[in-house]
Image (tube, rainbow, N blue to C red):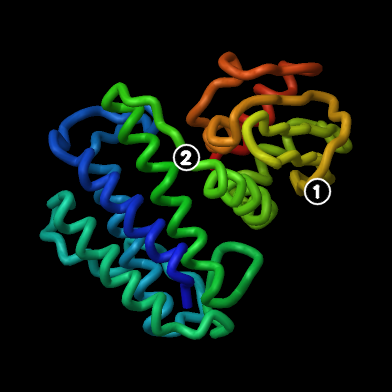
Amino acid sequence: MTDNTDESTIEAETARLASLAGDLSVPVPTCPGWTLAELVTHVGQTHRWATHVLRNRVQERIWSRQVPSGLAEGESGDAAWLTAGAATLLETLRVTDPAMPVWTWGPDKQASWWPRRMLFELVVHRADAELALGVDPVVPAPTAIDGVEEFLHNLPSAAWVTRPLAELGAEGATIHLHATDADGEWTITQGPGGAITWERGHAKGDVAVRGPVSDLLLLLYGRRSPDGLTVYGDRDFLDRWLSAAAF
């Protein structure tokens, strides 16, 4: 189902995260209450969840914790366990029809939704691990551009996000994101009931953020502060929106 680029990127991101999973007791500040052990276990369990959904053509909501992990009760995953789960996921993706109907929490109820979601689950949590270890995370520009659009595409389906967005009382407000190192500009419009719409291209927003596209992606996920970026307009609204919207 995935093309070679998708497969190699998932494989490479898994390898990068596995390489960071040495001392699993290190706290992960961007995932409060987690250590690297919890982070690695979460990512590996998510891979096994996706594999289960695709192999079993699941049609109704299933939680990741309902899928067997292969770990003993109370045991955490490690680099080898993470890598094994990713390998099984990739094998499954390669033989799955992308048009096959399956359950997803996003707007696209078919198998093709899963590889992109699994990639950015990896990218963001790899960044978490790097930040925990004092490494400045960087996402290649083409991947980051796709990541921004994957985030915006799924955001309206994330009920745990749309509820706090609705509480902002900001219907009609706009945020413009402008990548300074790649061809990427997006305008997000806050709609009723926490809904959002978005479009590509240049526009004037109530608040605008300019910076490298890797940083814009990590900003959306709450892994970067706007402080290191160029912000024009209503910074207070930006801060409140980002706090509500981060996955």
Please provide percent x and percent y for residue 247: 53, 42
Q: Looking at the image, which residue is at 11% across and 60% down?
A: 72
Q: Is residue 6 left or right of residue 147?
A: left
Mark 1 closeness class: few <14, some 14–19, many ≥20 residues within 10 Å = some
Going by the image, does 110 lie left or right of 4?
A: right
**Which sits in the foreground, 101 or 92?**
92
Please provide percent x and percent y for residue 212. 59, 29
Q: Residue 31 at x, y = what percent?
A: 38, 34
CB of mark 1 within 8 Å of CB of mark 2? no
Q: CA distance from mark 1 to mark 2?
A: 22 Å
Q: Looking at the picture, does residue 92 appear above or below residue 221?
A: below
Q: Residue at x 84, y 37 (%)?
A: 202
Can you tell which quarter of the image residue 135 is in?
top left
Disc 2 is placed on an element classified as loop
Position of residue 8 relative to residue 136, above or below, is below
Q: Residue furthest top?
A: 227
> Which is nearer the N-term, disc 1 or disc 2?
2
Q: Is residue 160 left or right of residue 166?
A: left
Amino acid beneath label 1: Glu
* Residue highlighted by disc 2: 139
**Residue 241 percent across, percent down from the top left:** 68, 30
In this rendering, which labeled residue sits more in front, label 1 or label 2? 2
Which one is in front, 141 or 187? 141
Residue 13 higher or lower than 165, as above or below: below
Q: Which mark is residue 199?
A: 1
User: Alpha-carbon neighbours of circle 2 within 10 Å: few (<14), some, or many (≥20)?
Assistant: some
Name which residue lies at 77% across and 32% down: 175
Disc marking residue 30? none
